[in-house]
Amino acid sequence: MAWERQTVGGLAYLKIPKWSLHGVTAVFSTRDGGVGSPPYSSLNLALHVGDTIDDVLHNRRIFLAGIGRSPEDCVTAEQVHGTAVRFVTEKDRGRGMQDLVSALPSCDGMLTAQDVGLLTFYADCVPVFFFHPRSRIIGLAHAGWRGTAANIVQEMVNRMIQVGADAEECLAAIGPCIGPCCYVVGDSVASIFREKWNEPSVLSETEPGEYSLDLQEANRQLLISAGIRAENISTAQMCTSCHAGEFFSYRREGITGRMAAYIGFS
Ligand SMILES: [Zn+2]
């Protein structure tokens, strides 16, 4: 199994043990082990969802301490459901970690080859992790339906290739996200996906005008189209909406917290 549950003290998260063997920590948080109150209970890690700032900063320290890092080591971005991808360096450390204004503006994908931890936030959208062992490039992409339709994962691969990586050797992993069991969309979103995926593995009509959309499978297929080998792609196969005790879900709860995806060199 590519993703494994781990518990450190009261903190539970998912990790890719295989990447740890290469010196890369790739982790997805759960909602457990934080200090937040409803509807953010308890480990909300995002500042933009209306939670108490002190609680979020406290939670970030708890989560990062659990994986051996601190907020000063990491960088976050202002996620806008776009396809902008930025390379970050050690100079970006700390951006967005104490406030929203210093986060990288309008950016849904980050890559680095330096010692800076990348953090992005989720409540149903798809976290896609990248690691190219030879060039030591790591990355994270935030793909909701808009980012998936606009193919942010292709943009991530393009940017990696520009700096000497290749898709053939690249490893990718998809973390927990809303599954086709719970993600129902209407005609307007379905028509955008139908243009690319006229097949039931990604989009299937469940009722007249209602469609089940599988964002994990869509991104898996996009990664393969971008040149990443199917056997190098790990999928968590965990629905954030089905698992209420473990994950925040925007679809299920509306106002709620966010989990974090983290990748960094260990
Ligand atoms: Zn579900």
Image (tube, rainbow, N blue to C red):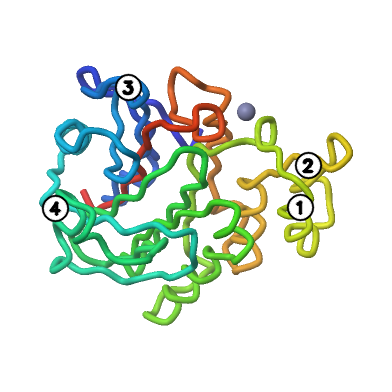
- Which residue corresponds to mark 4? 73
Element assignment for label 4 = helix
- Residue 131, position as x, y percentages in the image: 39, 58
- Which residue corresponds to mark 3? 41
Residues under numbered marks 3 and 4 in contact, where contact means CB atoms less than 8 Å apart: no
Q: Is residue 192 left or right of residue 117?
A: right
Residue 33 placement: quadrant: top left
- Residue 116, position as x, y percentages in the image: 20, 58
Q: Earlier in the sequence, mark 3 or mark 4?
A: 3
Residues under numbered marks 3 and 2 in contact, where contact means CB atoms less than 8 Å apart: no
Residues under numbered marks 1 and 2 in contact, where contact means CB atoms less than 8 Å apart: yes
Residues under numbered marks 1 and 3 in contact, where contact means CB atoms less than 8 Å apart: no
Q: Earlier in the sequence, mark 1 or mark 4?
A: 4
Q: Earlier in the sequence, mark 1 or mark 2?
A: 1
Q: Is residue 250 left or right of residue 181?
A: left
Mark 1–mark 4 Cα distance, whole angstroms, equals 40 Å
- Which residue corresponds to mark 1? 190
Residues under numbered marks 2 and 4 in contact, where contact means CB atoms less than 8 Å apart: no
Q: Can you tell which of label 2 and label 4 is closer to the viewer?
A: 2
147 shown above or below 158: above
Q: Amino acid at mark 1?
A: Ala
- Which residue corresponds to mark 2? 211
